[in-house]
Image: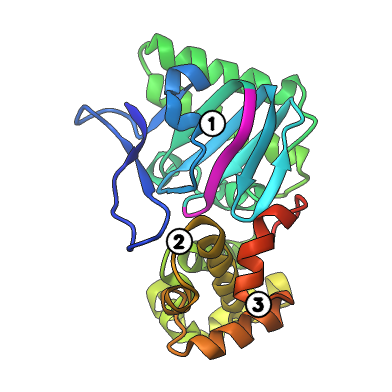
Amino acid sequence: MVAGTPGLRPRRGEPPIHRLEVPLPHSLPFTVGTFDSIGPMSRAEFPHRHTFHEIVYVSTGSGVHVVDVARWELAPPQVFVVAPGQVHRWDDVQGLEGFVILFTDDFLLHHPVDRHLLRRLSGRPLAPCDGGLLRPITELYDEYRWRADGVESVLRALLHVLVVRMARVADTGAPGPAETLVDQFARLTGQPGGESWSVRECAARMGVTPGYLAEAIKAATGRTPSHLIREARVREAKRLLVSSDLTVRQVADRTGFADPAYFCRFFRRETGLSPGDFRRVGDRAGNGNTP
C-alpha cells in the first residue's frame, strides 16, 4: 500500500489532494507504520489534502505541524488527527519519530460513530499522551505486520479502541442523533467546493428538509446552518490563501463569491483582516488555535 499517493486532481492552483493507493484488489483501505516505513510523504513539507483520515503519534522530534492555518509546536508525546479535506504540512521538523495510521471512511463502516469523534478530535493535538494511547497503536502496527487470520476484524476493533480512548483523553463523548447530523453536515461543507452550497442544497444532499436540518443543528450547536456554512467558507478561504498561489479574485471564485470586492468585505468582517493581509501574516500569526 502506498500512503499519500497524489491522486485526485485539485482545481488549478490549489494544494494537491492525496489518496490512499491500494496496489492489490482486495487490500485493506488501511495502513500503519513508522514515519520511515510510510515514506517521505508522511513528513511532507508542502501543503496538501487527503481523501482519508490520518492519525499521527509523535514520540520524539521538534518542529511545527501546520493544520489548515493553525501552527502546533511539537511537544512529544502527542497525537494529531487530520480529517479528510484538511490542509496540513510539517515545518522544520527534526528527529521526527512515531507512528502514522491512514484509513478511509470505508474502514469505519462497523463503527460509524467513530467518524464523528475523529472529526471532533481533528481540532487540536492530544497531549500529553500516556500508554493508554500508545498500546493500541503499537498493537495495530504489530497486527498489520503479522497479517494473521482475521487481521481485518482485529484491525477494525483496535482502531475503534484507539478512537474511543482518544475521545476520553479529549473528553469527547459519543454523539446523539443531532450531533451525527451536524457531523454529516460538517463533512459535506468541509470538502472542496462544499462550502459554497446553500442550506437547501446541503439538506437535499443529506436527504432531510431544510427546516429539520436547521432545527437539528441549532439544537446541537446553538448556531444556524448558515452560520456554519459561513465558517466553512472562511476556513476554506484561509486554507487557499496560505497554501496556494491563487489570486484573491480566484480564491473568491473558489469559495462561491462572484464579486471579489464583496468577498474582501466578507472576509474582513469575519476575520478582522483583508485577504491580502491574512496571506501575509495569517500563517505566521497562527498561535495554535484553529479558526
Secondary structure state at the residue bearing disc 3:
loop
Packing grade of label 2 (10 A; few <14, some 14-19, many >=20) is: some
> Is 125 situated above or below 197?
above
Rendered-image quadrant of the N terminus: top left
The quadrant holding residue 74 is top right
- Residue matched to label 3: 274
The residue sitting at 58% across, 16% down in the picture is 138
Q: Secondary structure at mark 1?
A: helix
Which quadrant does the C terminus fall into?
bottom right
Q: Which mark is residue 245?
A: 2
Residue 267 vertical position relative to residue 170 in the rendered view, above or below: below
Question: Mark 2 or mark 3, which has the lower sequence index?
Answer: 2
- The correct choice, above or below, for 231 with respect to 187 in the image is below
Q: Are marks 3 and 1 in contact (CB under 8 Å)?
A: no
Give how far apart the Cα atoms at labels 2 and 3 are: 16 Å
Say what amino acid the circle numbered 3 marks. Answer: Ser
**Marks 1 and 2, how far apart at CA:** 37 Å
Circles 2, 3 touching at the beta carbon (< 8 Å): no
Going by the numbered disc 1, the residue's amino acid type is: Leu
Query: Is residue 3 highlighted in magenta?
Result: no
Kind of residue sitting beneath label 2: Asp
The residue beneath circle 1 is 159
Q: Which residues are magenta?
A: 85-94
Q: Residues within 10 Å of mark 1 (few under 14, many from 20)?
A: many
Q: How is the image coloured?
A: rainbow
> Where's residue 283, x and y in %?
65, 55
